[in-house]
Amino acid sequence: MGSTAADESKAGAGDSRKPRDRAAHLKKHKKKVDKINKKIEELWQKDRQQLLNETRGDIKTRKKFEARRAESKAQRAESEPPRPKKDGDRSGARFASLAAAAAGTEPPKRSHEVWKNWKQLTGKDVAFEAIDVPGATLPPALEHGLERVLFSPGVHVLQDERTGVYNFSSYLKKLQSVHSFDFLKIPPYLPSSEDKVLQQITAANQARFTTSTSNVTGVLSQLHYLISRWRPLNLSRVSQLFGDVPTSPGASAAVPVSVFLRYQPDTGVYALDADKTLDSSLLLSHLGKVLELLLTTTPEQFAQYRLEDGGAAAPIEHEREAFHYSRAGSLVMRSQLDCYDRRLPGTGTFDLKTRAVCAVRHDIQHTQANEGTGYQITQMLGPYESYEREYVDLVRLAFLKYSLQARIGRMDGIFLAYHNIERLFGFQYVPLAEMDECIHGVHGERIAQDEFAISLRILEDVLAGAVDKYPRQSMRLTFHTAELAGAGGMRVFLQPMDEAVIEGRQTASKRERRGFQPRSLRTATEAAPATDTATDDAAGDAAHGVLWQSPPDDDAPVHLFTVSVANVVNGAELGLEETPDPASGDDWKVCYVVEEEPVDSKRSQERVRWLYRRAEDLRTQFQRRSEAAVAPSRMQTRLRQLGEKGRQHELRMSDVEAELALRLAPLAPDAGGAAGADGDAADGPADGARAAQSQPA
C-alpha cells in the first residue's frame, strides 16, 4: 500500500510537470517557425524586388513601362476580340501586376485612337539605295588562311588548348605593341564635316544631310529602342552552363546620344558629326587599327608599318580608303569597308571587329595602366574564360551597333578576332541575319530591315524640323529614349551653336585629355624616351581620369521635340509585350509624330532647360563611372584574379609547345612536320581557295 501511494505520488508529480514542459516546447517551436516564416518573407520580398528590377534595371522606369503595358492590353480588350498568341510570344502579365501593385496608381491614359492622326510608315515606303561612285577602290581580303572562317560557323581557335597545335599561323599569336606601330603611315579618320568628297556626292544627289556610320549609329540605336519599346533580347543561343542572363541591353543603352549638325556653306548640305566632347583616346581604338592591318596584310607588308628606333616617320600621302555610299530620302551615308570576299552574297564585303575580352572591357583603366591582362579564353562555354561569355556581351552591348553599321554599308556580316591586347585567341564570322535574330527574335531579319528603314525616315523628319527652325545654321541635337520607354516617346533637344563653338568643343577635349597615346602620335613636347614609356603612360592615364567638362551655354536657347510612336498590326495598336511578325503576313505599320513642346512661358522654358541639363548629366556621369579611378568592384577583382591565373596558363602552354616541337623535330627534314604544328600545313587548302578567289568570275 505504501509503495503504491508513493508511485501514485510520483506519477502525479510527473503529470503536473508535463504540461509546463509541453508549453515551453511549443513556445520554443513557435519562435523557430516565426523565424523561418520571417526569413521566407524576407526572401520573397527580395525575390519580388529583384523580379521588378532584373528586366530594366531601374524600378521607376519599370513602373512606367509596365503600367503602359497593362493600359495597352486593356484598350485592346475593349476594342477587338483577343488575338491568338503566336509561338514565342513573351507575356508580361506577372510583371504588370507587380508593377501595378508597387505603383499604387492607375496607368497613364492615352486614347488608342490618337495614332490614327499620325504619319504612317512601312518598311516598303522608304527606299534605301546604293550610290555608285566611279573609280571606287576595293577593300583588301583576309590573309593567313583566315578566309575559311567565313564559310564555317562557330569559333575557330588559333591554337588548340589540348595539343598546342596551331590551326592558323603562329605569327598571329603575339600582338605587336601600339608603341612600336607607326600610325602616321595609315590614313587618319575623316569626319563627315571634313570629307569634301562625301559632301560633293551629297550635293550631286540633291540631298540635304550627310553622315557616316560611326556618327549616326548612336542615334539609330535610340530610334531602335523607341520603335521596339525596349524589346527583350533573344538569348536562346546561350547554354545552361552560363546561368541567368538579363535580356535587357547594357547600361549604355539608356545614355543620351548627342550629335552636331554642321552647316557647310560651300555645298549647302548639313553634316552630322558625333559629339566628341566626352570621348577619350583609348588603347583599344588604336590597337583595333593595328589588328585590322595585321589580318589583311602579309608579314612582309605589315613589317613596313613598324616604328623605327629613330622615332615616327613624317606623315605620308594616303590613298582614299574603300567606301560604300547609300541614300535614304535626303540623307546620304558613308560606310568604310574593311574586307572583301567575292564568294559572300550581296556585295561580298564584311566588317572587321577586333573584340577585347571581358577583363579588358570591364576594367579598361587597369588594363591601360598595365598595357594588357593575363586573362585567357580556354573553353567554349561558361561564365568566364569562355567564348560564350564574349558572345553574350556582344549580344547585349555591341550587336545592335554592329548590325546597323553592316546594314548601312550593305555588308554581309562581321569578322570577329578575340584578343586580350597581348595575344589573339580565335576568330568567328557572324552573318547579319544572326545578329538580327539575337536583337529582334526569330523573324528578326525582316523586322530589322523594316525598322531600319523607318528609323531613317523618322531621323530625316527630325533633322528637317531642326533645319527649318534654324536654317543655314549649325546646331547640337541630343536624343534620349530611355525615360519615356513606357509611353513610346523620345526627347530630342535642339540647341543652335556657332561653328566656332562646335569646333572648340570637338578639339578642346583632345587638348585637355590626352588619354592613351601611342608613341608615334605624341607631339614633340609629349614624346618620352623609350626608357620612360611606362612612366609617361601612367601619368597620361592619371590625367585621363579627369574628364574635360565643357562650360554650359546658358544664353543659347534650347528647344524640345518629342517623337511619339505606335506599332500598328492589322489596324490595331500592338501591345508592348508583343512583337510584329511580317513573315506571317501581318500588316505592320509604325505611326509616329514629331511635336515641338511650346516654350511660351518662363516656367516652360525652365522645364525644358532642366530636362536638357538632366540629359547632359546622364552622359557625364556614365562617362565618369567608366573612366574614374575608383576601387575595383567584385567583378573587376575576380577578373584580375583570373588574369593572374592566365599567366600561369601561358607558362603551361609554353611547355606544351616545347614538348610538341621535340616530338616533331625528327620529321622536319622530311615533310615539314614542324610546319604542321605552326599551322602552315593547314593553310594550304585555304591558300588555294584564296587563289581561286582572285580569279575572274
Image (spheres, grey):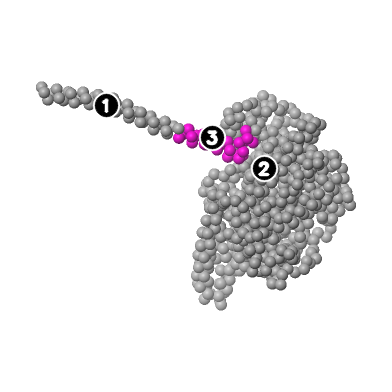
Numbered circle sitting on residue 18 = 1
- Residue 392's spot in the image, x, y percent? 59, 49
Q: Give the residue number, with chain letter if any, for mark 2.
A: 254
Above or below, 282 relative to 466 = below
Quarter of the picture holding the N terminus: top left
Farthest residue to the left: give it.
Answer: 1
Q: Which amino acid does label 2 sit on?
A: Ala
- Residue 601's spot in the image, x, y percent? 80, 31
Q: What residue type is labelled 3?
A: Arg
Q: What residue type is labelled 1?
A: Lys
- Stretch in magenta: 39-63
Quarter of the picture holding the C terminus: bottom right
- Residue at (80%, 49%) from the top-left corner? 502
Residue 375 placement, left or right of 217:
left
Whole-angstrom CA distance, mark 3 to mark 1, is: 44 Å
Would you say residue 61 sits in the magenta stretch?
yes
Badge 2 crowding class, 10 Å Cα cut-off, few under 14, some 14 to 19, many 20 or more, is some
Badge 3 crowding class, 10 Å Cα cut-off, few under 14, some 14 to 19, many 20 or more, is few
Magenta span: helix, strand or loop, mainly?
A: helix
- Residue at (74%, 48%) from the top-left corner? 550
Residue 147 placement, left or right of 207:
left
Say whether disc 2 or disc 1 marks the residue closer to the N-terminus.
Answer: 1
Q: Give the residue number, with chain letter if any, for mark 3.
A: 48
Q: Nearer the viewer, residue 86 or 524?
A: 524
- Residue at (67%, 48%) from the top-left corner? 623
Badge 1 crowding class, 10 Å Cα cut-off, few under 14, some 14 to 19, many 20 or more, is few
